[in-house]
Amino acid sequence: MPEGHTLHRLARLHQRRFAGAPVAVSSPQGRFASAAAVVDGQVLTGASVWGKHLFHHYADGPIVHVHLGLYGTFTEWPVTDGAALPEAVGQVRMRMVGAEYGTDLRGPTVCEVVDEARMSDVVAKLGPDPLRSDADPSWAWARIAKSRRPIGALLMDQTVIAGVGNVYRSELLFRHGIDPFRPGRDVSESEFDAAWTDLVALMKVGLRRGKIIAVRPEHDHGAPSYAPGRPRTYVYRRAGEPCRVNGGPIRTTVLEGRNVFWCPTCQT
Ligand SMILES: [Zn+2]
């Protein structure tokens, strides 16, 4: 599942490609057709993100709300003057076409037209997004400090912090020596503050570079990543491999439905 930095990159891209001009919006697959008609031909004023939720804002007020879920993707293509648009291949839920670019959305969990009030309802359920300038970490800390749930589960809970997925969750806890099974209320405020500051910095790198970079240079000796083209990680998807710091085996188990990875020596 894409993590928050990927959504923020998409919002920036869509803003750059489409904002300030009318866009043609359609649903080649049909499932979004009547909603697409509401915004079709309107000026896109901007795109915004909270956590893993993407919003396209239109001049007359409507907002397209997208959540990619596990399988959703946007595919971009150039618009050539005088040439026909590319045929929609597969299940294209939403097609958005501007003067120079078009993009096709396939496989999202959510793609709907909402108003400001409904958007506020969606956002009100979400914790602070580390990549938003208005993020208030004290809100997340208040939830974590009184919770018996494992910190590894709390970090993935979008109502506590919005935008963190499994890679940032696993890597952040390693970087701060925190066992993912430690109850939230046993995490100290200084540990939380340091982890939040680090999370913001890591996600900003992800936003800028388009990939997750979590291994510090002193621990990165070019060791292979868990799969071709994937980031090098301390623990994520490295079960049974040696810890990059002390050489002991990385462990994995299921925590609230998702695999968590950690080093039992480095993380307490
Ligand atoms: Zn270790």
Image (spheres, rainbow, N blue to C red):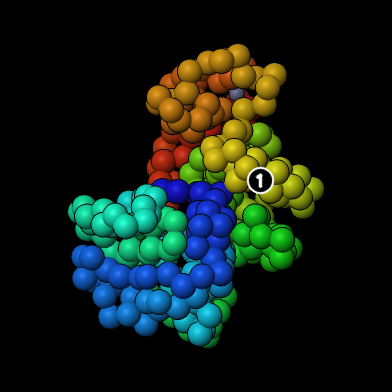
Horizontal placement of 211 versus 245: left or right?
left
Of 233 and 57, the residue lying toward us: 57
Horizontal placement of 59 versus 35: left or right?
right
Residue 238 visible: yes
Taking the spot 51% from the left edge, 85% from the top edge, the residue there is 60
Placement of the C terminus among the 4 image quadrants: top right
Of 26 and 131, the residue lying toward us: 26
Residue 215 percent coordinates (x, y): 62, 28
Residue type, numbered disc 1: Lys
Residue 109 visible: no
- Tell me the quadrant of ligand 1: top right
Exactly how many numbered labels are in the figure? Answer: 1
Q: Is residue 156 above or below residue 219?
A: below
Is disc 1 placed on a helix, strand or loop?
helix
Taking the spot 79% from the left edge, 48% from the top edge, the residue there is 190
Taking the spot 28% from the left edge, 64% from the top edge, the residue there is 93
Q: In the image as oriented, which residue stretches furthest toward the front?
A: 82
Taking the spot 70% from the left edge, 43% from the top edge, the residue there is 201
Is the C-beta of the residue carrying label 1 under 8 Å from the nearest atom of ligand 1? Answer: no
Q: Is residue 171 above or below residue 3?
A: above
Label 1, residues with CA under 10 Å away: few <14, some 14-19, many ≥20: some
Report the residue marked by disc 1.
Answer: 204
Residue 127 percent coordinates (x, y): 60, 65
Displayed quadrant of residue 240: top left
Displayed quadrant of residue 220: top right
Q: In the image as oriented, which residue stretches furthest toward the right?
A: 190
